[in-house]
Image: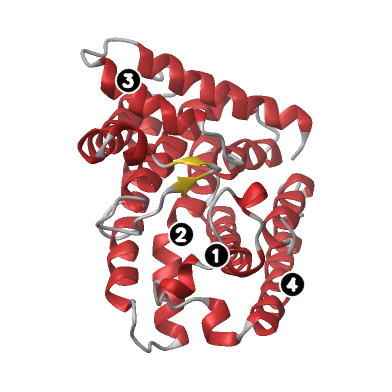
Amino acid sequence: MNKDLKQYNEKAENLILEHLSGGNISDVIRKASTYSVEAGGKRFRPYLVFATLKSFGLDPAAGLSAAAAVEMIHTYSLIHDDLPAMDDDDYRRGKPTNHKVYGEAAAILAGDNLLTESFNILAQDEALDADIRIRLVQAISAAAGQTGMIGGQMLDIDAEGKDITMDELVLIHRHKTGRLISAPIESAAIIAGADDDTKALLLRFAEYLGILFQIRDDILDVEGDMSKTGKLSGSDARKGKVTYVSTYGLNGAKEQLDLLKVEAEGILESLSSKLDTGELYSVLEMFAVREQ
């Protein structure tokens, strides 16, 4: 990550933690909510907001509330994913999962809290015009809800232990993982006032990033080192999940990663006459790298 842009990730995290510390009537909810935020992670999603704004030549700080909101939604989804009723994981980002520390009820409510307060952060950002805030709420909620991440998660659960087609697998990942990858890029495009053609190309690029991210995650579930990935390897196979590795094999999944990277590079080439795409190329490298 670009060091200058990475500082905005830290500012977004500070914004989240400051917001969670204020006006909270339950110390347990405050602690459970902040626990998963402070557990770390690569902060890809906030970074996408700042990198995209930079490509427009804008101050990345304009995207702080949007970046914070997307990261809060992502964190809530991880808390809920780890619950016994979902993926039943004991570790996340190298630490005990939220429900292992605070119990299932508090973990559920901490996730609910992060989701709800993410929109509160957006609503309070008076540095953005009201119509921009409304459009951001619409875009991010659509990415997170029944037509986005939540819908994709349900499709993923329904597919466990079943033989599904590659088209069905892509549909799952386009929504379960991809929509929260596209949301920060779309948010930056909204803030920047991008024209329809530019926004459409950026969203196509974001869709490729989402698939690349999932393929890489599937590969790391097989080859990953817990000290680096923060979770136990082989969990997908144990749960009978359909993945790019289970469908294509390990080498085939790596080939897909390389092929899709080339497609994404073609989109950036199309954008290069309108935007400074240098940072977006760097983002693509992060998403497509095979190693941890």
Looking at numbered disc 3 in the image, what kind of residue is underneath it?
Arg
180, 216: nearer the viewer: 216
Q: Is the C-beta separation of discs 3 and 1 under 8 Å?
A: no
Q: Earlier in the sequence, mark 3 or mark 4?
A: 3
Using the image, determine if residue 235 lies above or below residue 41: below
Q: Earlier in the sequence, mark 2 or mark 1?
A: 2
Confirm whether residue 181 shows in the render: yes
> Circle 1 sits on which residue?
214
Q: Is the C-beta separation of discs 2 and 1 under 8 Å?
A: yes
Mark 3 → mark 4, Cα distance in angstroms: 44 Å
Number of the front mark, 4 or 1: 1
Mark 4 → mark 1, Cα distance in angstroms: 16 Å
283, 13: nearer the viewer: 13
Q: Earlier in the sequence, mark 2 or mark 4?
A: 2
> Circle 3 sits on which residue?
30
Residue at figure coordinates x 71%, y 55% from the top left:
292
Q: Position of residue 91 (x, y in %)?
A: 47, 47
Q: Residues within 10 Å of mark 2 (few under 14, many from 20)?
A: many
82 sits left or right of 243 in the view? left
Label 2 secondary element: loop
Q: Quadrant of the N terminus?
A: top right
Mark 2 → mark 4, Cα distance in angstroms: 20 Å
Seen as rendered, the residue at the extreme top is 23
Q: Residues within 10 Å of mark 3 (few under 14, many from 20)?
A: some
129 sits left or right of 199 in the view? left
Q: Is the C-beta separation of discs 3 and 2 under 8 Å?
A: no
Q: Earlier in the sequence, mark 3 or mark 2?
A: 3
Q: Which mark is residue 262?
A: 4
Looking at numbered disc 1 in the image, what kind of residue is underneath it?
Gln
Residue at figure coordinates x 66%, y 84% from the top left:
252
Label 4 secondary element: helix
Using the image, determine if residue 127 lies above or below residue 114: above
